[in-house]
Amino acid sequence: MVRGVYTEYSGPYLALLEIAHWYEVILILGFCSLFWATSVTGMIVLVAVTYFAELIVDNVTARLTWRWMLKSAVGVGVVLTVVNMIWVYAH
């Protein structure tokens, strides 16, 4: 019981979650490599660090439920949105 949210799913729904997870990883790594234009070496290092950070977050949040994760993500997202709006309108 170390998969957290994944313990509630099986069969085709679990397969869809796994596919969505890999699409998410590829999308994040693609964005990192897309917006890094200085050197190929720097891009590879950035992608490796980002993937390592994603693995850390994945392992730290393994036992959490989807409800807790949704509440925390919305809370952090709202705070960051407000900070961004204050930053944009202040300058």
Image (spheres, helix red, strand yellow):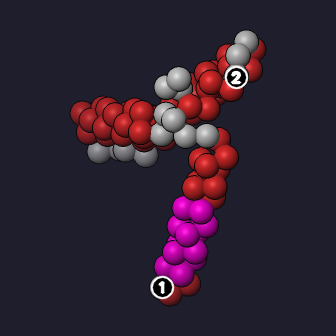
Q: Magenta span has 50?
A: no
- Residue 9, which numbered label? 2
Quarter-of-image position of residue 40: top left
Q: CA distance from mark 1 to mark 2?
A: 47 Å
Residue closest to the far top: 11
Query: Residue drawn 48% across and 39% down?
Result: 61
Pointer 1: what residue?
91
Task: Name the residue at the left extreme.
Answer: 41
What residue do we see at 49% from left, 34% from top? 62
Q: Position of residue 65 (x, y in %)?
A: 61, 40
The three-letter amino acid code for the residue at tag 1 is His
Left or right, residue 56 beside residue 20: left
Q: Which residues are magenta?
A: 75-87
Magenta segment, prevailing SS (helix, strand or loop): helix
- 14 versus 74 height, above or below: above
Task: Say which residue appears at 58% left-offset and 74% top-offset.
Answer: 82
Report the residue at 29% width, 45% height from top: 38
Looking at the picture, tell me which residue is in the foreground, 64 or 75: 64
Along the line of sight, which residue is nearer the eye, 11 or 2? 2
Looking at the image, tell me whether mark 1 or mark 2 is earlier in sequence order: 2
In the rendered structure, the answer to whether residue 5 lies left or right of residue 28 reads right
Residue 47, position in %: x, y? 36, 35
Residue 23 visible in the shown view: no
Q: Is residue 62 above or below residue 71?
A: above
Q: Amino acid at mark 2?
A: Tyr
Does the magenta-highlighted stretch encompass residue 84?
A: yes
Q: Secondary structure at mark 1?
A: loop
Query: In terms of secondary structure, where does tag 2 sit?
Result: loop
Label count reads 2
- In the rendering, at what x and y percent does residue 80 appear? 53, 67
